Image (cartoon, rainbow, N blue to C red):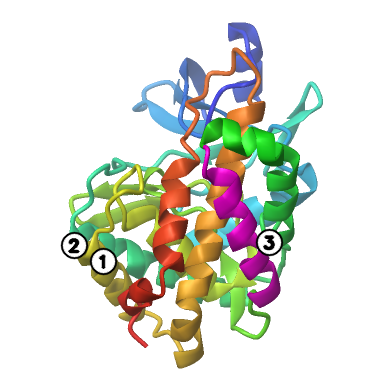
């Protein structure tokens, strides 16, 4: 989440008026993330309590043609009891609209906070919630290729160039060259597939205590290796933010929570070390590209690519494969 597009008060009021959600009271830009422009919206109808929503304007990294997949998936999962926000359809029944050449959508605001220092209990709950959406999506009728799969990592990192990677850290180009060669030749093609979130970081999970109240930001959701989603979530939750410390209690809790709802097959368990290397490479790639290419003046917090280079080095060490019990 970020703010690239600027909207004036009159523009914002007109946008909200297209939805049957009351009159705009306030709109506050949200600075986290790097992909789309987001605002926290508050509206009110006569004699009713204020309501909150998230307004998203989709920027260059989100293909408008993919929006029906993302937004229909939210409604599908919400209807099956998953803790995800519903899409607010406009007065014509559409899940998204166009404004000055960009698509936008209004999404239900869910209660809860994103945790920065999760406990094992919270991490266990996240693992269970991830498995819940994997099972609930088995009868979702649409598919979408992973736009951030191995080919995209290779493209993004190639666009950074060795000099660009070395400008971030002197060792980064070497790490990328070594690991990308392994991943491109060994990436599995025969594991179970399904709809995955593909970006389940702590800031995309809302919690109250140890209860997951919201899984949000499904804009990288796609059809891909289901266990890869476990690996992505592991890389996101089971290390210190800078990637220097592995947190074994969180690792065990995440896997336990996931398998309490959807047990992994032996083939999936055996593939987790390689899938985790891929997960680390995926976020290294996008962070490095954004580090070098985010426009000046964007209201966005850049994230250090080396935090995932350190995770990648950890996963690549054969000694650490034991963190994923076979």
Ranked by sequence position, the earlier of labels 2 and 3 is 2
Q: Which residues are magenta?
A: 170-186
Quarter of the image for residue 282 reads: bottom right
Sort mark 1 into few (<14), some (14-19) or many (20+) by Cα contacts within 10 Å.
many
Residue sitting nearer the eye, 175 or 280: 175
176 part of magenta stretch: yes
Instruction: Name the element at disc 3.
Output: helix
Label ID, residue 145? none
Does 8 appear above or below 100? above
In this rendering, the label closer to the viewer, 2 or 3: 3
**Residue plotted at (66% across, 20% down):** 295
Sort mark 2 into few (<14), some (14-19) or many (20+) by Cα contacts within 10 Å.
some
Disc 1 designates what residue?
124
3 part of magenta stretch: no
Disc 3 designates what residue?
150
Disc 2 designates what residue?
121
């Amino acid at each position: 989440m970020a703010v690239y597009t600027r909207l004036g008060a009159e523009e914002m009021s007109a946008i909200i008026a297209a939805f049957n959600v009351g009159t705009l009271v306030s709109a506050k830009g949200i600075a986290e993330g790097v992909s789309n422009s987001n605002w926290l919206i508050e509206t009110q109808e006569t004699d009713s309590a204020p309501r909150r929503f998230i307004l998203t304007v989709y920027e260059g990294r989100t293909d408008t043609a993919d929006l029906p997949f993302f937004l229909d998936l939210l409604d599908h999962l919400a209807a099956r009891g998953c803790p995800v926000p519903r899409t607010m359809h406009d007065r014509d029944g559409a899940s998204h609209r166009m404004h000055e050449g960009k698509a936008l959508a209004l999404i239900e605001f869910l209660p809860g906070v994103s945790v920065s220092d999760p406990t094992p209990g919270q991490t266990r709950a996240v693992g269970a919630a991830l498995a819940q959406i994997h099972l609930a999506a088995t009868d979702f009728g649409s598919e979408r290729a992973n736009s951030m799969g191995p080919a995209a990592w290779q493209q993004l990192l190639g666009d950074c160039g060795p000099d660009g990677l070395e400008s971030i850290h002197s060792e980064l180009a070497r790490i990328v060259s070594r690991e990308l060669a392994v991943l491109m030749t060994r990436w599995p093609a025969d594991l179970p597939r399904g709809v995955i979130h593909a970006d389940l970081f702590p800031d995309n999970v809302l919690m109250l205590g140890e209860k997951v109240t919201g899984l949000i930001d499904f804009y990288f959701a796609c059809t891909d290796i289901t266990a890869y989603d476990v690996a992505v979530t592991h890389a996101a939750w089971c290390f210190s933010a800078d990637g220097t410390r592995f947190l074994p209690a969180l690792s065990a809790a995440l896997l336990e929570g996931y398998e309490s709802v959807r047990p992994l097959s032996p083939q999936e368990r055996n593939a987790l070390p390689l899938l985790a290397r891929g997960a680390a490479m995926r976020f290294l790639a996008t962070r490095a590209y954004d580090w070098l290419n985010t426009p000046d003046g964007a209201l966005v917090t850049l994230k250090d690519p080396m935090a995932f280079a350190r995770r990648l080095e950890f996963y690549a060490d054969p000694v650490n494969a034991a963190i994923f019990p076979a």
